[in-house]
Image: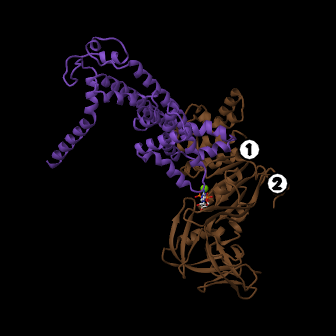
Chain colours: A purple, B brown
Amino acid sequence: MRRTWVKRVLAVHGALFLLFIYAPIVMVVVYSFNSNPINMMIWSGFTFDWYWTIFGYPTQLNEQTLYVDSTDRLLAAVQNSLIVATSTTTISTVLGTMTALALYRYRFRAQRFYQGLLYMPMVMPDIVLGIALLVFFVSFGMALGLISIIIGHCTFLISYVFVVVSARLAGMDDTLEQASADLGANEWVTFRRITLPQILPGVIGGALLAFIISMDDLVITYFISGVDSTTLPVFIYGMLRRGVKPEINAIATIMLMLSFTIATLGLYFRRRH
Amino acid sequence: MSGEEEARNQQTPIAEVREAVKRFAATEGGVITALDGVSLKVQPREFVTLLGPSGCGKTTLLRVISGLEELDAGEVLIAGEPMTTVPPHRRPVNTVFQNYALFPHLSVGDNVGYGLDVAGVPRRQRNTRVGEVLERIGLGGFEPRRPDQLSGGQRQRVALARAIINRPSLLLLDEPLSALDRNLRQSMQLELKTLQHDLGISFLFVTHDQEEALTMSDRVAVLNKGRIEQVGTPEAHYHRPATRFVAEFIGDGALFSGRIEGPTEDPVLVTGDGLRLAVALGTTVNQVATLLLRPEHLEAAPEAPDAAFGVIEVRLKQSVFLGASRKFVCCLANGATVTAAPTGAGAQALSRVAPGELVRLAYRRDQPHLILGADDGT
Ligand SMILES: Nc1ncnc2c1ncn2[C@@H]1O[C@H](COP(=O)(O)OP(=O)(O)OP(=O)(O)O)[C@@H](O)[C@H]1O
Ligand SMILES: [Mg+2]
């Protein structure tokens, strides 16, 4: 008796929890197909027009409304975001993996301290990191632009990659590298044929994480982006400040799909190894 | 020393370890001396076993030879060449690791072929040799399998195949059989021995199983707390152990420590609690010594034993059936246990004794080995 009662409460609790997390996201996706240009909360028919709008195609809706923000600027922001995300992913994956390997392989003084320093950027408030980076770039007279954003992102994304790859390394059987050396492979061959394949899921996971965080970062980027180096999140933020427009929903839905794809890819690589 | 053995000692050893010292920093502070001045030679085509309890430094000694561990003092020579500055990948030895260390992301064929691949052997030749080696160890056609699709015994064979494919002059084997069940283990012991003979290379084999060491080796080195206690043939270890530790570690038997006393024509060993055991004639009196009574030395005492025999009075505790024979576990007056495993008529005489009864056992006084010198307490 009591047990079925407890079960029911738990089931309701579970349902509410999922609703709480996913309802807003579902709403955004649904709204992105709503053809009502005035009030997105009232359903007035299904349409793809918001998607056409953000890619700059003329539609019935944008004739009636004044919502056509500059598509060129949106696309430029997307392009900036992609440039930043791919560069930072590459740099932070290489450096983060190298750091993880060095800390795994060598024992040296103040190792724990060094490890602590690597975790720091992950727990530091974004605002603080943003201000610090801004002050740093300004004092060195560096122009704010894509380069400053890339450097800024790398400072904390290296930490993320480091953590993910370190976890993978900790689970690796270190006699594998020794067996490879024993069989005549030098350090480089051992790295390429044994170590790298062993930690690859971690490296790919770290890279995907870095990519998503970089694509998504608003606070830090907001501080260190120049006038003509707006990234997608900064652009959207700017758009919102001039009122919530329905295209936002379409943009959010597309970003959601992208994140989904990347996460699925990540899971797929996890599985395969 | 046999003629063959003498001839061996004339050659340059395949591997030689001189006064090796290896210390590790313990995590809880202080140092662990894993190797404490170890010297050992392995001759060409020789099967040498390192035997010792867990933690005595067996793995460390192998790792020092393969170059995975650097020495704090002493040196390693392979084929007469000092190895101090030679990295592991340039040493002509290969290892079968304690946990096998198969590469999980590579197939069996790629695992076995790894040594050839890094040496740049052409593909076709490499495939042929991988096929041959797998065939040789009874895993023909297993190339496409993954290590996680193999049984423990098969993994062990793959590790072996991977280590011999480069034709090392010395193969290091770190307890390769310890994870296998008893039957598999015994057949693998024979197979390894045959393999070593066919390949014509030296094996340095690690085990903590004394039976395995005795059945497989040309020579055994008993290691204890980072030191070598004794190096020699299995027979020498069994019949003439150099220390109490070796005597305890190898074979069954009861050990009695005490002083040699009495007239020269009837020397006896007197233990701390007054037990008197006859020892071989000619033993120097007034010195400390340890007597090793093996089960096969003991039999039921004749009615009137002559001076060639030592006699002890014991109470039979139990008689244990061993298949082909029987052993009799007995208890001495001071509580110590001795086991007798007589053959033939001696066994029949003891079979008639009921557990709990008193019985007299005898041994030829010149048979049991006497370890002279102070009891080292280990
Ligand atoms: N990397 C290390 N760091 C610290 N101590 C170590 C290290 N490797 C070995 N030791 C210590 O050195 C001693 C010898 O270890 P070793 O692995 O050689 O023993 P073993 O004879 O192979 O034992 P087993 O039969 O259990 O494999 C042990 O006390 C062990 O704790
Ligand atoms: Mg070991």
Q: Which residue is mark 1?
A: B90
Q: Is residue A120 left or right of residue A65?
A: right
Q: Secondary structure at mark 1?
A: helix
Give B373 or A60, whichever is nearer the viewer.
A60
Q: Which residue is mark 2?
A: B8
Do the residues marked 1 and 2 share a common chain? yes
Give B180 or A62, whichever is nearer the viewer.
A62
Residue A244, picture quadrant: top left
Residue A26: x percent and y percent? 27, 29
User: Is residue B123 at least partly visible in the picture?
Assistant: yes
Image: B360 above or below B247: below
Looking at the rendered structure, the kind of residue marked 2 is Arg
Residue A3: x percent and y percent? 18, 48
**What chain is tagged by disc 2?**
B
Estimate the spatial distance between the alpha carbons at disc 1 and disc 2, rounded to whole Å: 26 Å
Image point 39% across, 31% down: which residue? Answer: A234
Give B123 or B86, whichever is nearer the viewer.
B86
**What chain is tagged by disc 1?**
B
Image point 68% across, 38% down: which residue? Answer: B115
Residue A109, picture quadrant: bottom right
Label 2 packing within 10 angstroms: few (<14), some (14-19), many (20+) = some
Image quadrant in which the N terminus of chain B is located: bottom right
Disc 2 under 8 Å from ligand 1? The reply is no
Q: What label does residue B290 carry, if any? A: none
User: Is residue A273 at least partly visible in the picture?
Assistant: no
Residue A57: x percent and y percent? 36, 12
Looking at the rendered structure, the kind of residue marked 1 is Arg
Image point 32% across, 22% down: which residue? Answer: A250
Label 1 packing within 10 angstroms: few (<14), some (14-19), many (20+) = some
Q: Is residue B7 left or right of residue A80?
A: right
